């Protein structure tokens, strides 16, 4: 499962996935949804440095769009709202 949280709005989007290599595809769908339906843009992606968010393809995609912030995995205080929801 991929969980995306808008820190400013505290809106939550959940996408089921069958394997971690599908996260980038789901993230692209999430971005399209946010840009089209909510009329907002994602300015920064904060992730817990988990394996699904540090693949080369994900890194290249993020670098082409905006800034990405990686926190330490297994450290809930650093990972904010999403970690609290989990």
Image: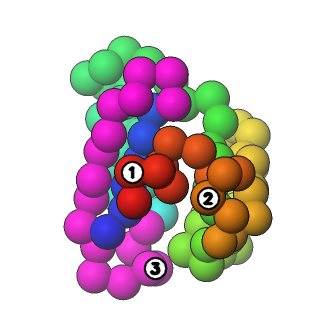
Q: Which labelled disc corresponds to residue 21?
A: 3
Indicate whether residue 22 is drawn in magenta: yes
The colour scheme applied to this rendered structure is rainbow
Residue 66's image quarter? Answer: top right
Is the C terminus in the top left, top right, bottom left or bottom right quadrant? bottom left
Q: Which labelled disc corresponds to residue 76?
A: 2
Image point (30%, 45%), residue name: 13
The answer to whether residue 15 is above or below residue 44 is below
Which region shows up in magenta? Answer: 7-23
Secondary element at tag 2:
helix
Residue 6's image quarter? Answer: top left
Q: Position of residue 20 (x, y in %)?
A: 44, 79
Where is mark 1, residue-wise? Answer: 85
The answer to whether residue 5 is above or below residue 18 is above
Secondary element at tag 1:
helix
Circle 3 residues within 10 Å: few <14, some 14–19, many ≥20 = some
Cα–Cα span, label 2 and label 1: 10 Å
Image point (59%, 45%), residue name: 80
């Amino acid at each position: 499962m991929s969980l995306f949280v808008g820190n400013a709005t505290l809106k939550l989007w959940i996408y089921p996935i069958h394997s971690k290599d599908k996260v980038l595809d789901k993230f692209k769908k999430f971005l399209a949804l946010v840009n089209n339906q909510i009329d907002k843009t994602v300015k920064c992606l904060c992730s817990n440095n988990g394996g699904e968010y540090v693949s080369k393809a994900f890194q290249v995609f993020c670098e082409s769009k905006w800034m990405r912030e990686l926190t330490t995995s297994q450290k809930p205080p650093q990972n904010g709202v999403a970690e609290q929801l989990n």
